[in-house]
Image (cartoon, rainbow, N blue to C red):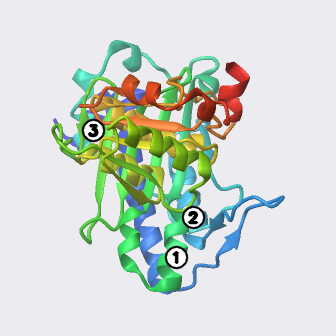
């Protein structure tokens, strides 16, 4: 069967993921082009004394391409991106991944039955986009001429259905020079990476640029329980979850700074590999269109070989109660 026939046979969700894979890679190309040009046009989006929240021309152009490409192919699909302001990149990605289309027969009937024309589809299916996860690392890499930090940059496209992630794409433009793309659909495993087996060491990853006392206290509590033999700090939720898939035990962020576009894609990928991602009290995150953008209950992601509940229970309730969402639901 040729690619056109595969596309015509495929269900809406399969097509959406197949397109998202190629769109994420095109966005990665834009990021690398902007970086190579040297003029990042960095602005700070933070307000009211909040921590610095940098945005670059790469963020703006990459999101423009992602939204324009998916909207032109899938009409009025509901896309929620990180950036409120974008820059026209005069480009659109029309190709798709045939590797994704080949999984059509493995996809569950509930996902196959999603129809773009059904009433209320814009509320049922939401695409969460972070066009450049790890912008802080980009800014530091440029300032300090530390190209190694660019490995932590990812493009994230997550697809939620009825508020829960069902598919995700993580593109890592600087991995190995040429980049790599990891993607998953619920029930069909994870592709583009081979999850690491159980490790003797319990290495935990956390934020590099948004550390605070609550995060440090949570990590100390895990160390006391023997659940964190070492702590490594990285940027970007996408990269940290990739580290979990590559052998780290967990990603712990007991703070409110992470947002839905940071976690939708990575939760779909991690869960497809057998891992879990919740807030630090063990509650599932909701990705409905109307939900608040901030993950105010924090984030805890665990490897497939880790007992997620063990990590949840080892973080003191007093620390959990420091987070707005946890305190409100306690």
Left or right of 48 in this view: 84: left
Between label 1 and label 2, give the one nearer the viewer: 1
SS at mark 3?
A: helix
Labels 1 and 3: the sequence-earlier one: 3
Residue nearest the viewer, comparing 192 with 304? 304
Residue nearest the viewer, comparing 3 with 327? 327
The local crowd at label 3, few if under 14, some if 14 to 19, many if 20 or more residues have their Cα within 10 Å, is many
Residue nearest the viewer, comparing 30 with 139? 139
Residue 18 visible, this angle: yes
Q: Which residue is mark 3?
A: 100
> What residue is at 62 percent from the left and 27 percent from the top?
288
Q: Position of residue 1 (x, y in %)?
A: 16, 35
As measured in the structure, the alpha-carbon distance from the residue carrying label 1 to the one carrying label 2 is: 15 Å
> What residue is at 30 percent from the left and 47 percent from the top?
229
Q: Position of residue 31 (x, y in %)?
A: 46, 69
SS at mark 1?
A: helix
SS at mark 2?
A: helix
Residue nearest the viewer, comparing 24 with 231? 231
> What residue is at 41 percent from the left and 37 percent from the top?
301
In the displayed orientation, state which residue is furthest to the front: 224
Q: Position of residue 329 (x, y in %)?
A: 68, 20
Q: Which residue is mark 2?
A: 59
Which disc, if any, is residue 140? 1
Residue 291 visible, this angle: no
């Amino acid at each position: 069967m040729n690619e056109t026939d595969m596309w015509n046979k495929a269900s809406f969700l399969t097509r959406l993921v197949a397109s998202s894979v190629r769109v994420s890679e095109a966005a990665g190309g834009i990021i690398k082009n902007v970086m190579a040009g040297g003029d990042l046009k960095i602005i700070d989006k933070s307000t009211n004394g909040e921590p610095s929240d940098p945005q670059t021309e790469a963020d703006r152009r990459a999101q423009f391409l992602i939204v324009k490409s998916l909207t032109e192919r899938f009409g009025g699909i509901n896309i929620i991106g990180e950036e409120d302001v974008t820059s026209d990149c005069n480009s659109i990605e029309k190709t798709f991944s045939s590797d994704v289309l080949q999984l059509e027969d493995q996809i569950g009937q509930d996902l196959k039955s999603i129809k773009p024309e059904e009433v209320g589809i814009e509320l049922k299916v939401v695409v969460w986009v972070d066009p450049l996860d790890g912008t802080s690392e980009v800014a530091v890499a440029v300032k300090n001429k530390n190209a190694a930090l660019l490995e932590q940059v990812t493009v994230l496209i997550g697809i939620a259905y009825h508020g829960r992630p069902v598919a995700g794409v993580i593109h890592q433009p600087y991995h190995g020079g040429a980049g790599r793309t990891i993607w998953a659909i619920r029930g069909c495993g994870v592709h583009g990476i081979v999850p690491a087996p159980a490790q003797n060491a319990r290495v935990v990853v956390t934020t590099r640029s948004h550390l605070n006392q609550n995060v440090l206290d949570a990590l100390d509590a895990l160390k006391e329980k023997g659940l964190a033999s070492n702590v490594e700090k990285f940027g970007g939720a996408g990269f940290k979850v990739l580290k979990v898939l590559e052998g780290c035990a967990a990603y712990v962020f007991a703070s409110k700074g992470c947002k839905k576009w940071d976690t939708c894609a990575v939760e779909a990928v991690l869960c497809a590999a057998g891992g879990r991602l919740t807030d630090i009290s063990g509650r599932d995150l909701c990705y409905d269109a109307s939900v608040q953008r901030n993950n105010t209950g924090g984030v805890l992601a665990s490897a497939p070989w880790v007992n997620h509940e063990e990590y949840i229970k080892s973080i003191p309730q007093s620390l959990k109660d420091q987070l707005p969402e946890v305190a409100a639901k306690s």
